[in-house]
Image (tube, rainbow, N blue to C red):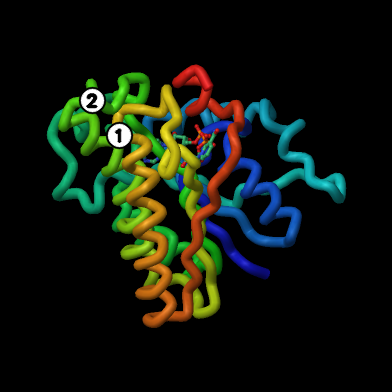
Amino acid sequence: GKRAFIAGVADDNGYGWAIAKALAAAGADILVGTWVPALNIFETSLRRGKFDGSRRLPNGSLMEIVKVYPLDAVFDSPEDVPEDIRTNKRYAGSSNWTVKEVAESVKNDFGSIDILVHSLANGPEVTKPLLETSRKGYLAALSASSYSYISLLQHFLPIINPGGATISLTYIASERSIPGYGGGMSSAKAALESDTKVLAFEAGRKKQIRVNTISAGPLGSRAAKAIGF
Ligand code: NAD
């Protein structure tokens, strides 16, 4: 069977969860990367059976998440983590959650994967119009929502089996003006879409890995509700 790593699953409401289920139903082994600050509640909810209803697959069995990895995709390696994050109590309880370390952990645990899914985004100023967005907020949106995909691909490429596939999720606000999708999130999705073409060429040439992005319709995920969508 195939093995999939899905970055950006922290509850059962988002695209990451739905993609995990579809892949599990097709017979894949599921690994997920969960944002460090959301890890505790996600693992607790899983353990207590809170997601059992939504873990049910078409054949009646429950989706098994083989392993949950803590992940913060805005940090590539431990040297990049600033003091305030390192010592933050929500982070201090976990380890090896930078992109490089997660890829190393997956390699040590399983050797390789076949499918990499990027289902994460963050824009601290998403509720602000672009015209009112700060440089810091804009760059944070790009870091969490666009560069995070480049970083994941960079670090996971050596362990993705040839013929493997990677996808991310984008949104139509990249190409049309959608009021409410601010803070540089529209810019972040435009970057993600352009990068997908370049990365598809590069990863295709290098290792026969496919790189795609899906422009998803509106879904009432936690992230979408946070911006009133
Ligand atoms: P979601 O809240 O289920 O998923 C976003 C995830 O990103 C969360 O689990 C969050 O914890 C995680 N995350 C945020 N910052 C992170 C970081 N630095 N490192 C690791 N994880 C981090 O919401 P969703 O709407 O399902 O979002 C998944 C993807 O789908 C995103 O790329 C989003 O932009 C895209 N999308 C969503 C919609 C929609 O309407 N919901 C539409 C089109 C595209």
Q: Is residue 118 above or below residue 132?
A: below
Q: Is residue 80 above or below residue 224?
A: below
Q: Which residue bears the numbered disc 2? A: 133
Q: Which residue bears the numbered disc 1? A: 184
x 76%, y 44%: residue: 62
Mark 2 vs 1, N-terminal side: 2
Q: Which part of the image, by quadrant, shows the N terminus? A: bottom right
Question: Element under label 1?
Answer: loop
Name the residue nearer the viewer: 144 or 12: 144
Instruction: Name which quarter of the figure residue 88 lies in.
Output: top left
Question: Element under label 2?
Answer: loop
Image spot of residue 51 (x, y percent): 68, 31
Q: Is residue 59 above or below residue 187?
A: below
Image spot of residue 204 (x, y percent): 43, 77
x 42%, y 23%: residue: 180
Instruction: Name which quarter of the figure residue 136 lies in.
Output: top left
Image spot of residue 126 (x, y percent): 35, 25
Q: Is mark 2 within 8 Å of ligand 1?
A: no
Name the residue nearer the viewer: 219 or 93: 219
Q: Residues within 10 Å of mark 1 (few under 14, many from 20)?
A: many
Q: Are marks 2 and 1 in contact (CB under 8 Å)?
A: yes
Q: CA distance from mark 2 to mark 1?
A: 7 Å
x 31%, y 22%: residue: 129
